[in-house]
Amino acid sequence: MGCLADACWASGGRPGPAPVERPTFARLKLHGLRLRSFRRRIDERLLQGVAFAARCSGAATCAYFVANLIGLPHPLWATISALMVPQEKLADTNASFWGYIPGTLVGIGAGGMASVAASRLALDMAGQIALSVGLCAILARVWPSTRVCMWTGPIVLLTAEPALPVTHAAFYRGSEALLGAFVGAVFHWAAEMVVLPIVHQATLKTAQFWSRRNSQRL
């Protein structure tokens, strides 16, 4: 008690500085766990972003390569379809794929019907597009996943060659669209069911290794 009084008197009646609180082992460990958890969340988001970019790029490239390899005249539509079908989640991609198939077929049929009507009713291209889209919009209103039919018809009409029947353009545009849709769906399935689990396990093992190493240091 006398020592405290002397120290207080020596400092001019003011209490001395508070003792510095040193970090304990428990606090250091908790801080390390928080940092590892934060880093794990960043790694997962980064992994998902890289996987999404690689999946989209791979699907578009593969669709173009296959369409060009088998001699389809416009591989562009295969590339576009490969990017349109895949969604954020695999279940959404499956629903999009199974809606894309009938939508494409309906769009092809609507384009052919509009072309036949044009020969009998003397419709110009604008009238054919209006008729094709109008017919497809009835289905798309009831079944939104088939909305691809609304632009498949105009694509068939606009890419048809005057010297060839419209069925020629309908066959090739449908083949390109369905090929791209299939490639996009397969790439998403492979990424979700094969590639991501392998990468996730490797990332988890790496995180566990560094966690044990940091625990040994603490």
Image (cartoon, rainbow, N blue to C red):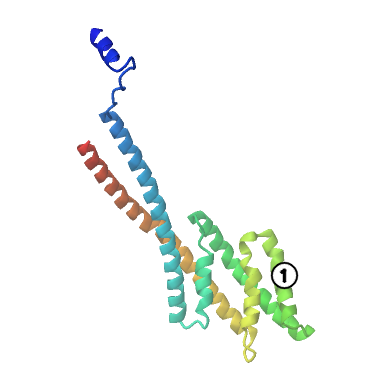
Label 1 sits on what residue type?
A: Leu
Q: Name the one closer to the observer, 1 or 203.
A: 1
Residue lying at the far top in this picture: please name it. Answer: 2
The quarter of the picture where residue 191 lies is: bottom left
Q: Please determine whether, in this image, residue 107 is positioned above or below residue 200.
A: below
Residue 209 is situated, as x and y percent measured from the top left of the image, at 24, 45
Q: Which residue is painted at 64% across and 69% down in the image? A: 149
Position of residue 9 relative to residue 90, above or below, is above
Can residue 181 be seen in this snapshot?
no
| Residue located at (29% from left, 18% from top) | 11
Residue 178 x, y percent position in the rendering: 53, 71
Above or below 61: residue 12: above
**Is 192 displayed left or right of 151 in the figure?**
left
Residue 167, picture quadrant: bottom right
Q: Position of residue 68 (x, y in %)?
A: 45, 80
Where on the picture, by quarter, is residue 174?
A: bottom right
Q: Name the residue tied to disc 1.
A: 135
**Residue 9 screen position, x and y as percent:** 29, 13
Judged from this view, the residue extending furthest toward the left is 216
